[in-house]
Image: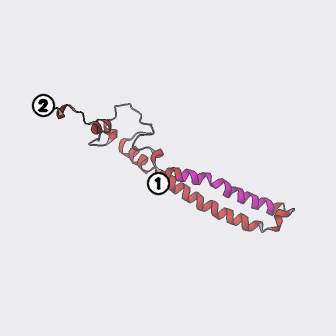
Amino acid sequence: MSDNTHAVADHASETYPEFSGKVQDTYIEGYDPVSFAAPHSSLLRVSTWVGMGLILSLLPAAGIVIWGLGTHTFHYGTASRNNPMAFTIGGAIVLVILSVAAVASVYYGRRYYRQYRKETGRSN
């Protein structure tokens, strides 16, 4: 019987090729890599998604600040029995902390995209 192992394709290397250089060096001129699977995509990073979640969590903190200012301004009813300035100050502190964390997380998540733009000069 003859040995036919040379006829079998290497499925792993054909399906998931490893590039020897940078992927953007193999792009055709004029190709716009805006897909989810681009190696520089910010959508692949957990820190980007955490930052976006933190941006959404700014809304309750802003609501607490607005509620505290509203009960301080219109101080009638049962809501004025609480200390409205404590809610305003506490909400503002949480708002600032979450804002800094959100911006830092999104900035960190987009680091590969900024590196890609710097290396290639492309806008996306």
Name the residue carrying label 2: 2
User: What kind of element bears circle 1?
Assistant: helix
Of 79 and 100, nearer the camera is: 79
The tag on residue 108 is 1
For label 1, count other residues whose C-alpha is less than 10 Å away and answer few (under 14), some (14-19) or many (20+): some
Give the prevailing secondary structure in the magenta stretch: helix
Q: Which residues are magenta?
A: 50-71
Q: Is residue 99 left or right of residue 8?
A: right
The percent position of residue 80, horizontal first and vertical second, equals: 83, 65
- Residue at the location (81% across, 61% down)? 73
Q: CA distance from mark 2 to mark 1?
A: 57 Å
Q: Quadrant of the C terminus?
A: top left
Mark toward the start of the polypeptide (2 vs 1): 2
Reply yes or no: does residue 37 show up in magenta. Answer: no
Q: Is residue 25 left or right of residue 124?
A: left
Reply yes or no: does residue 53 show up in magenta. Answer: yes
Q: Which quadrant holds residue 123? A: top left
- Residue at the location (66% across, 53% down)? 59
Q: Which quadrant holds residue 22? A: top left
- Residue at the location (41% across, 44% down)? 40
Figure check: 11 above or below 69: above
Disc 2 marks a residue whose amino acid type is: Ser
Disc 1 marks a residue whose amino acid type is: Tyr
For label 2, count other residues whose C-alpha is less than 10 Å away and answer few (under 14), some (14-19) or many (20+): few
